[in-house]
Image (cartoon, rainbow, N blue to C red):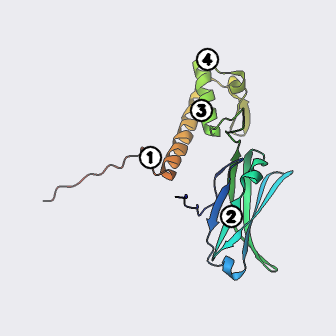
Amino acid sequence: MAAETPTIEPALITAGSTATWKRSLSDYKASDGWTLKYRLRKSTSTNLSITSTASGDDHLISVSAATTAGWTTGKYAWYAFVESGSQRFDVGEGFLEVRADPATSSSFDGRTHARKMLDAIESMLEGNASREEQALTITSGGVNRQIQFCTKEELLKFRAYYSNEVRAEEQALARQQGRATGNRILTRFKKAS
């Protein structure tokens, strides 16, 4: 049984894997001649283009594994628009991350930024941070500082912040996978008089 095609843009694409999603745009149906296009931008020199194909009224986006294998890893801003003849309308924008292919990359690190920062901060507090971890930079109040130059109080503050970020990411992933998030909803029933 094939997996159901997602109906929103992905937040994460693995280089070397096929990326597929479908968009329904009631005002700009593919069957009416509209084409959905995406521009992904990582830097001034890295721009990617994606064009949908019609799937009934919907717009199907399918990027081959061979194509994503050539994408540079990192965070991209995406912009979506529809075109028909000389008309063009904006329909969305957001961000996604392209991660290295774990099957071929010798330096694959699947951790999110928040997880990497939390691990580095905890290593600093424990006194066994690697040089790479010590060199990570934290931005606070518009000032960039390497972790190795933070005070213990600052590290504790940053640990609390990144702990919350990691927890939110883990809960979002659990929801996406249909698992329990760990949040409990407490209720109290009042006895009828």
Secondary structure beneath dot 2 equals: strand
Q: Earlier in the sequence, mark 1 or mark 2?
A: 2
Q: Which residue is mark 4?
A: 127
Residue under the point 72% across and 32% down: 106
Q: What amino acid is found at the position of numbered circle 4 in the picture?
A: Gly
- Inter-mark Cα distance, 4 to 3: 14 Å
Secondary structure beneath dot 1 equals: loop
Q: Earlier in the sequence, mark 3 or mark 2?
A: 2
Which of the two marks, 3 or 2, is nearer to us in this view? 2
Question: Counting other residues with Cα less than 10 Å from the Cα at mark 1, is it few (<14), some (14-19), or many (20 or more)?
Answer: some
Secondary structure beneath dot 4 equals: loop
Q: What amino acid is found at the position of numbered circle 2 in the picture?
A: Ile
Q: Are marks 4 and 3 in contact (CB under 8 Å)?
A: no
Q: Within the image, what quadrant is residue 59 found in?
A: bottom right
Q: Earlier in the sequence, mark 4 or mark 3?
A: 3
Q: Are marks 3 and 2 in contact (CB under 8 Å)?
A: no
Which of the two marks, 2 or 4, is nearer to us in this view? 2
Q: Is residue 190 left or right of residue 152?
A: left
In the image, residue 8 above or below residue 44: below
- Inter-mark Cα distance, 4 to 1: 32 Å
Q: Residue lying at the far right in this picture: please name it.
A: 45
Q: Which residue is mark 1?
A: 181
Q: Which residue is mark 3?
A: 118
Q: Is residue 77 left or right of residue 1?
A: right
Q: Is residue 87 visible?
A: yes
